[in-house]
Amino acid sequence: MDWYSIVKFLHVVSAVLWVGGGFVLFLLGVLAERAGNIEDKLQAMRASGQLGGKFFAPMSMLTLVFGLIMCGFWVGFAELWIVIGLVGYATTFSIGMLIFKPTGERMGAMVAEQGVTPAVLAIGQRMMSWARLDYAVMLVIIADMVLKPTVHDIGILAGMAMVVALGAALAFGGSRQMVPSAA
């Protein structure tokens, strides 16, 4: 076995833990949302918040570091699929740091101060919307890493663009409020 294989293995394992773990929590939130189960949805959001900085951020950083090591020593940075992967990573990292982290912290403070309110649920819904876009981007990153498209792979590139567009449409195309009505 060579060093490239070891680093690639570590890159894939950290990516699976990061993306797979987050996807399970996202799926739990979606299932709770569809069932109208506010408590289960809040539990999924709490778990996401608790694991965000302690698990998902480190796994995402390890994925990046191992990928950069592979590029630096063996692959290079000139290939289109590398650029797409890095842009995708920057996008999902930015969503995590600029949307999920501060919004999760704000939600936690609001719940501690006021309990579960319609405002908290509305904020949670916005986070779920961003998560839809985030996972569309992650799906494109995974496809990119496996398929390694070049500028000549128009169909693959168009499909990737469509996945991101669909993710954005699902995220922001309509309001799916799970806020209880005032009784």
Image (cartoon, rainbow, N blue to C red):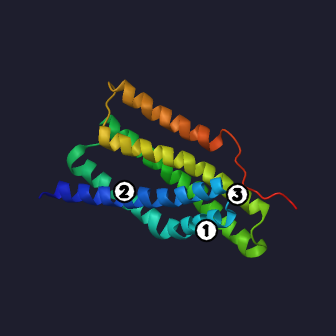
Identify the image quadrant of residue 81: top left
- The amino acid beneath tag 1 is Gln
Q: How crowded is mark 3: few (under 14 residues within 10 Å), some or many (20 or more)?
A: some
Q: Position of residue 30 (x, y in %)?
A: 59, 54
Q: How far apart are marks 1 and 3 (CA)?
A: 14 Å
**Which tag is nearer the camera, tag 1 or tag 3?**
1
Of callouts 1 and 3, which one flags the residue occurring earlier in the amino acid sequence? 1
Q: Residues within 10 Å of mark 1 (few under 14, many from 20)?
A: some
Q: Is mark 1 on a helix, strand or loop?
A: helix
Q: Where is residue 176 in the image (x, y as percent from the top left)?
A: 70, 47
What numbered label is drawn on residue 15? Answer: 2
- Say which residue appears at 54% left-offset and 35% top-offset: 165
Q: Distance between the residues labelled 3 and 2?
A: 28 Å
Identify the image quadrant of residue 3: bottom left
**Which tag is nearer the camera, tag 2 or tag 1?**
1
Q: Name the residue under label 1.
A: 43
Q: Name the residue under label 3.
A: 123
Q: What element carries label 3?
A: helix
Q: Distance between the residues labelled 2 and 1?
A: 24 Å
In front here: 32 or 75? Answer: 32
Of callouts 2 and 1, which one flags the residue occurring earlier in the amino acid sequence? 2
Horizontal side of residue 114 vs 98, given as left or right: right
> Is label 1 in contact with label 3 (beta carbons under 8 Å)?
no
What numbered label is drawn on residue 114? Answer: none
Q: How crowded is mark 2: few (under 14 residues within 10 Å), some or many (20 or more)?
A: many
- Say which residue appears at 68% left-offset and 57% top-offset: 36
In front here: 72 or 183? Answer: 183
**The C terminus appears in which quarter of the rendering?**
bottom right
- The amino acid beneath tag 2 is Ala
